[in-house]
Image (tube, rainbow, N blue to C red):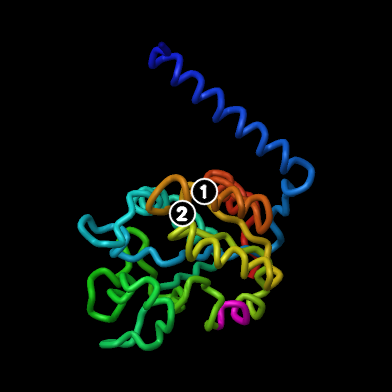
Amino acid sequence: MTNPSQATSGSEASDRSLDDSLDNNYKGVWDGRIGFGKRPALLVVDFMQGYTTPGSPLFAQGVVDAVANMPPLLNTARRTGTPVIHTNILYHAPDQIDGGIWVKKAPVMRAMVAGNPYAEFCPEVAPHEDELVMTKQYASAFFGTSLASTLVAMGIDTLIITGCSTSGCIRATAVDGVQHGFRVMVVRDCVGDRHPAPHEANLFDIDSKYGDVIDSKAVINHLLTHPYNP
């Protein structure tokens, strides 16, 4: 009869083998690095209270953790003059008709209407008056907005992405970001999701194919050592 410790060890060994196999499978094919360009902007995607309020259907501990990790990065961007752009999701009440099929697929998003506390920004990362806020109705920060045109007009070539959720709006924005010609940097400890599994799976995919996944310390170091040149 197998004892529990042997079963656990076997499971852990199997997981390590799977990880090794996955890394080897992608190595040399889907493991390129793009790096920072000359002019970055920090994008803060949908850090709204619906994701951080206990009891909310959208509540995600991973987002709570990501918000808690944001202040040093956000403060560094502001101190170095790096442009900061925020997004939120808002629908037209009472029927959220501008949410189209998405609010039919995910009716939990119907809470994102003006006046609902869940649709308010998290205080720790609330926009400053001089920071642009772009309102969107779908996952990607590029879809149906002027984000791409705004970044091009500002001469931005690198998009530092933070926010939520990793498997939804972050991934969609990362994919559209590279498709619009921007270097995509997703900040691992400043994005969050409902569960670690989709969070990690999507970070893996983004890092493999659409951009670089790096931590906030690396971003802060880059911003401090490469001052923004407007």
Residue 100's place in the image compared with 35, above or below, is below
- Toward the viewer: 70 or 182? 182
SS class of the residue under badge 1? strand
Residue 148 falls within the magenta-colored stretch:
yes
Residue 21's place in the image compared with 47, above or below, is above
Q: Measured from the top left, where is residue 100 in percent x and y? A: 42, 84
Q: State whether the magenta stretch is mostly helix, strand or loop.
A: helix
Residues rendered magenta in the picture: 146-150
Residue 78's place in the image compared with 71, above or below, is below
- Toward the viewer: 130 or 24? 24
Q: Measured from the top left, where is residue 177 in percent x and y? A: 63, 68
Res 108 → quadrant: bottom left
- The answer to whether residue 102 is left or right of residue 159 is left
Residue occupying the point 29% across, 64% down:
49
Res 53 → quadrant: bottom left
- The answer to whether residue 53 is left or right of residue 144 is left
Residue 106 falls within the magenta-colored stretch:
no
Question: What residue type is disc 2 on?
Answer: Val
Residue 191, which numbered label? 2
Check the picture and name the quadrant holding the N terminus: top left
Residue occupying the point 45% across, 70% down:
86
Residue 206's place in the image compared with 10, above or below, is below
Check the picture and name the quadrant holding the C terminus: bottom right
Question: What residue type is disc 1 on?
Answer: Arg
- The answer to whether residue 111 is left or right of residue 62 is left
Using the numbered discs, state the Cα–Cα distance from disc 1 to disc 2 in whole angstroms: 6 Å
> Neighbour class for label 2 at 10 Å: few (<14), some, many (≥20)?
many
SS class of the residue under badge 2? strand
Q: Which residue is mark 1?
A: 188
Q: Measured from the top left, where is residue 17 in percent x and y? A: 62, 28
Q: Measured from the top left, where is residue 18 in percent x and y? A: 61, 33
Residue occupying the point 39% across, 70% down:
128
